[in-house]
Amino acid sequence: MRGRLLRSFLAVLLPALLLLAALQPAPAIQPDEMLADPALEQRARELGKELRCLVCQNQSLVDSPAGLAGDLRHELETMILQRRSDDEIKGFMVERYGDFVLFRPSMQGSNWVLWLGPFAFLLGGAFVWTRLRRRSDADVPVDLEQARRRLEASD
Amino acid sequence: MRRLAFFLPVLIFLGVAGYLLVGLTLEPQRLPSALLDKPAPEFALPPLEGRTAERAADGLSSAALKTGQASLVNVFASWCLPCRVEHPILTELSRTSGAPVFGINYKDKPTDAAKWLRDLGDPYAAVGADRDGRVAIDWGVYGVPETFVVDGKGVIRYRYAGPLTEDVVERELLPALRAAQKEG
């Protein structure tokens, strides 16, 4: 009985999964866009993954099928062929589109809040937690006998 | 201490709720221009073929933005529906704002763009054809239409991404333009 349930489940699930895999979006990068040198192409891909597409804002330049992303990939590849450094290429994008294009924002200006904020929250939480804990330690019932002795001693 | 322990979570909740409430009213699609208060990029664009206007053969270059007169720069395309929506407002601005409206025709077929201007009217003092969109990248354009206010020295003072509305013109664009015109 159980085996049959499992089998019918798989019979539905497997094709569904395969269908999902088949529905993957077509790759955004067209074959004619690729650089001849695989090492340079690799560099272009890695940099492109670090840069946000301004049209589909949660996709990288590599993933996005938007026209602007294609144009920016073209710029990126041109700069790579000119042997420009990663920083220069990222600088080119930031100059035009702001820090927002970087998926890993630089630590300049107000961006440090992004980087340090989570740690600040963690520290704050730890502080509150230790305070609360210390107080619950203090809530341990008082040893009456000891208290009486101390009271007598102070008389 | 006990009261703090009670109020702290409430305070944190109010803080986070307020933060999220503000977040709801923001439009993350509208990016601030990275070029604000920076000189407009240097460029020289060829004229839009087929455009029939006075001095239509001049094209558009960055020199036109540095004549001492504040101007508006509008990035448009005939294939862009929102551009059609904002076109009457742009026409109105070209008549009443006292600033020339320059057009950058973005990734468009010249015949389409020229026909578009003939059909709807041509509010532009000059139009440059940016066939491959390269100049628009230098302007940090990420969609059409976009409109910039440039002061007389060629410095970008304001940018609006998306179709202009009466409201945006009244509240944001015109005040920015007036300020740029006052500076001379």
Image (cartoon, rainbow, N blue to C red):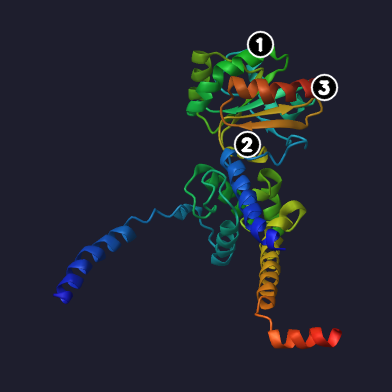
Q: How much space separates mark 1 and mark 2, taking CA atoms? A: 25 Å
Residue A125, position as x, y percentages in the image: 66, 66
| Mark 1: amino acid | Arg
Q: Earlier in the sequence, mark 1 or mark 2?
A: 1
Mark 3 residue crowding within 10 angstroms, few (<14) / some (14–19) / many (20+):
some
| Residue marked by disc 1 | B95
Amino acid type assigned to the residue bearing label 2 in the image: Ala
- Indicate whether B30 appears above or below A107: above
Q: At 71% from the left edge and 52% from the top edge, which residue is drawn?
A: A91
| Numbered disc in front, either 3 or 1 | 1
**Mark 2 surroundings within 10 Å by alpha-carbon count, few (fewer than 14), some (14 through 19), many (20 or more):** many
Asked whether disc 1 touches disc 2, contact meaning CB atoms under 8 Å apart, the reply is: no
Q: Which residue is mark 2?
A: B136
Q: Secondary structure at mark 1?
A: helix
At horizontal 49% and vertical 14% (from top left) the residue drawn is: B119
Q: Residue at x 17, y 67 (%)?
A: A8
Against B140, is B87 above or below?
Answer: above
Q: Which residue: 49% across, 18% down?
A: B115
Q: Which residue is mark 3?
A: B68
Q: Quadrant of residue B147?
A: top right
The quadrant holding residue A107 is bottom right
Can residue A85 be seen here? The reply is no
Say which element carries label 3.
loop
User: How far from the left and from the top, in percent, is residue B157?
Assistant: 75, 31
Q: Characterize the local packing of mark 1: few (<14), some (14-19) or many (20 or more) Cα atoms within 10 angstroms.
A: few
Mark 3 → mark 1, Cα distance in angstroms: 19 Å
Q: Quadrant of the C terminus of chain B?
A: top right
Residue B42 lies, in percent from the top left, at 74, 35
Q: Image quadrant for the N terminus of chain B?
A: bottom right
Q: Give the amino acid type for the residue marked by disc 3 in the picture.
A: Gly
